[in-house]
């Protein structure tokens, strides 16, 4: 059973999460301080912590609803990256998000190319779609929020310009 | 010749450009209001127009080097890259990423060039077969890389900058929060 297409989507998933130093989700938080994670711009509400937490939570949810039993909802304890008694740290957040990534990646790796165009239903989106559409959402989600984080970081570090 | 893998890349190119209503580049641009196009946010420097200029010219240059004759440089005229369009001869390929006010193109022109960049890149990728995805292709800053790496960067690029544009827009419009916090 062919997996040529599946392998490319896994490549894109990995690149979007931690493969690209410039555009990936983890690549854009690497080296940031705790204060950077918590800072909010003068006219903005969301911090890097809020955006990164959203991206990580969404991946746990998407995996559960697309490939699993759909038991993880927005209030599920898995979506709390800081266990009771622990203190927030960037490292803790990244490892929590990495666990979500590995779960999603493993589910995709079980597919064949034929599965990619098969329809499935995921309650979280309340719509049916090709399996590859659901995978695309996750790839896109990491990259989109990596871009938001980069703009926020650039405002924080006062270097919002093209690299020279 | 198999195209199972190439088909996924073409699909993702389309999704990242204008296939995804929430996270695609065109969706982010469609959510702009008057004044969002050419004004930075407080403490920022780049405008949406600057970001679109960057994305557009990268699509054209990545395609030109990886899939065409790779003869143009960043300080050449933008018109040489887009000969079918009417473009100010003082505008360079590099300069479109932050043009001086007297050379700034209209939003409509920029959008036309952006769509042309996507069309060219998509056409080039769609001509490949799976075996060609791991062929070495030229890069616009020198050297070579696997075709699939170059295509991946272009997919990432649209989505990454769509996120930047959304953050810039949300701050400008005073609604930098999650959708479920805004909707009644």
Image (cartoon, coloured by chain):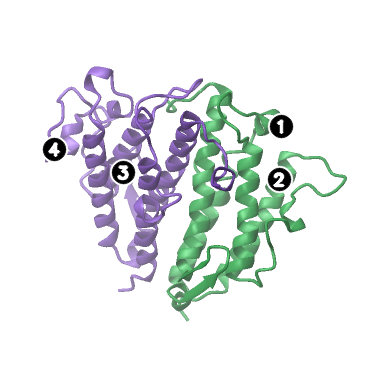
Q: CA distance from mark 1 to mark 2?
A: 11 Å
Q: Secondary structure at mark 3?
A: helix
Q: Is residue B114 left or right of residue A74?
A: left
Q: Is residue A34 left or right of residue B57?
A: right
Chain B, chosen colour in render: purple
Q: Chain of mark 4?
A: B
Q: Are marks 3 and 1 on the same chain?
A: no
Mark 4 or mark 3, which has the lower sequence index?
3
Residue B93 percent across, percent down from the top left: 25, 31
| Residue drawn at 31 percent across, 33 percent down | B53
Q: Are marks 2 and 4 on the same chain?
A: no
Residue B51 percent across, percent down from the top left: 38, 33
Q: Is residue A163 left or right of residue A145?
A: left
Q: Residue furthest right?
A: A85
Residue B85 image label: 4
Name the residue carrying label 3.
Answer: B59
- Whether residues under marks 4 and 1 lie with C-beta atoms below 8 angstroms apart, the answer is no
Instruction: Using the image as rendered, state which of residue B27 and residue B118 is in the foreground.
Output: B27
């Amino acid at each position: 059973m062919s997996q040529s297409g599946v392998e490319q989507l896994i490549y894109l998933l990995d690149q979007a999460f931690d493969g690209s130093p410039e555009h990936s989700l983890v690549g854009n938080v690497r080296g940031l301080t705790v204060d950077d994670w918590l800072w909010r711009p003068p006219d903005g509400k969301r911090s890097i912590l809020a955006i990164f937490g959203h991206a990580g939570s969404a991946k746990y949810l998407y995996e559960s609803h697309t490939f699993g039993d759909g038991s993880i909802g927005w209030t599920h304890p898995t979506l709390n990256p800081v266990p009771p008694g622990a203190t927030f740290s960037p490292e803790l957040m990244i490892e929590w998000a990495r666990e979500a990534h590995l779960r999603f990646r493993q589910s995709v790796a079980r597919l064949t190319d034929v599965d990619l165009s098969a329809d499935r239903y995921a309650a979280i989106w309340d719509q049916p779609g090709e399996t590859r559409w659901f995978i695309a959402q996750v790839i896109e989600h990491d990259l989109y929020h990596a871009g938001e984080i980069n703009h926020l970081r650039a405002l924080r570090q006062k270097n919002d310009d093209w690299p020279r | 010749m198999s195209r199972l893998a190439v088909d996924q890349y073409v699909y993702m190119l389309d999704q990242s450009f204008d296939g995804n209503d929430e996270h695609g580049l065109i969706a982010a641009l469609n959510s702009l209001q008057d004044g969002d196009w050419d004004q930075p946010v407080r403490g920022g420097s780049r405008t949406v127009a600057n970001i679109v200029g960057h994305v557009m010219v990268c699509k054209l240059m990545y395609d030109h080097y990886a899939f065409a004759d790779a003869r143009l440089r960043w300080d050449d005229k933008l018109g040489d890259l887009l000969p079918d369009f009417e473009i100010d001869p003082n505008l360079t390929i590099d300069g479109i990423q932050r043009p001086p006010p007297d050379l700034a193109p209209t939003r409509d022109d920029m959008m036309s060039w952006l769509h042309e960049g996507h069309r060219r890149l998509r056409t080039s990728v769609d001509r490949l077969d799976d075996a060609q995805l791991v062929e070495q292709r030229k890069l616009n800053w020198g050297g070579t890389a696997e075709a699939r790496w170059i295509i991946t960067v272009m997919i990432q690029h649209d989505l990454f900058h769509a996120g930047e544009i959304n953050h810039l827009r949300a701050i400008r419009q005073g609604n930098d929060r999650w959708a479920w916090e805004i909707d009644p």
